[in-house]
Image (tube, rainbow, N blue to C red):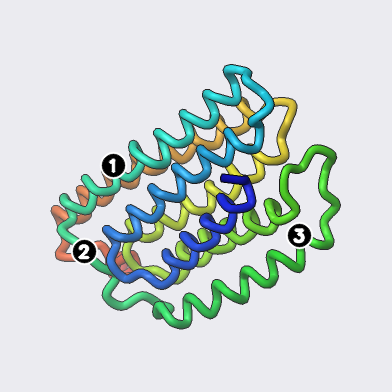
Amino acid sequence: MTPDIILILVVLTNLRLLGASRIGASVRTVAVQGILLGLLALLAHHGESSSSVWLVAVGGAVLKGVVFPWLLFRALRSAEVEREVEPFVGPIASLLAGVAALGVSLWLAQRLPLPEGAHSSVLVAVALFSILVGLFLIVARKKAISQVLGFLVMENGIYTFGVGLVRESPLLVELGVMLDVFVAVFVMGIALFHISREFDHIDTHELTTLKD
């Protein structure tokens, strides 16, 4: 398997997230994406056997593919929610927006100078696409847990940049980003648990009624 194949699969997982309505399936898709990015880190640095490369790859795959999904499934069980019933933007419109975002990402990537040692001509495009998809999920979904998934996808885009382009200190960059995400997911899981105990839903737009 080559890095380009991994990147294509990452694009497909992003499109799957945009078209999914069941939150459990979305969590599993994000888990698969995390494992794919762990493989990307190994394939992108296959000629290097340093411990930092293996730590970034294995650590990223474990956190993104196992730990974060486990925390999110616990939050799902606590909140007793299965699907995004009425998102701000529906699945079909989200897919169309995703295709447009992919086109914009490819266009921008062609106009950005690639640093020496970049492993794939489409890596920048996929990283930008993941960031845009994550931002879209944060804005276009009502359920708090769906927005957490958007945050994770956005971080996956940053991770893609890091494992493919940062050659001097990838370990420092990725561990710093993953630590921030871990704290965010942990805090959001606690918030979801307490919200679900007090209210009948976890739609974030309903929280505005608290100020009335």
Q: Residue at x 52, y 31 (%)?
A: 57
- The answer to whether 64 appears left or right of 80 in the picture is right
Disc assigned to residue 82? 2
* Quadrant position of the C terminus in the picture: bottom left
Residue at 28%, 41% (x, y): give it: 70
Q: Amino acid at mark 3?
A: Ala
> What kind of residue is marked 1?
Leu
Label 2 or label 3, whichever comes before in sequence order? 2
Spatial CA distance of label 1 from label 3 is 34 Å
Rendered residue at 61%/46% (across/down): 2
Of the 4 image quadrants, the one containing the N terminus is top right
**Could you tell me residue 10's position as x and y percent?**
53, 55
x, y percent for residue 122? 70, 56
Q: Find residue 136 and report its horizontal and vertical position in percent.
A: 51, 66
Residue 156 is labelled as none
Above or below for 138 versus 152: below
> What residue would you read off at disc 3?
109
Q: Mark 2 belongs to which amino acid?
A: Glu
Q: Is residue 124 above or below residue 172?
A: below
The answer to which quarter of the image holds residue 100 is bottom right
SS at badge 1 = helix
Tell me the quarter of the picture where residue 74 sits: top left
Q: Answer yes or no: do the residues labelled 1 and 3 have beta carbons within 8 Å?
A: no
Residue drawn at x 50%, y 63% is 12
Callout 3: few (<14), some (14-19), or many (20+) C-alpha neighbours within 10 Å?
Answer: some
Q: Earlier in the sequence, mark 1 or mark 3?
A: 1
Element on which disc 3 rests: helix
Q: Which mark is first along the chain, 2 or 1?
A: 1
Label 2: which secondary element: loop
Task: Give the image location of residue 144, x and y in percent.
Answer: 33, 59
Q: Which residue is mark 1?
A: 71
User: Separation of disc 2 and disc 3 at Cα?
Assistant: 36 Å
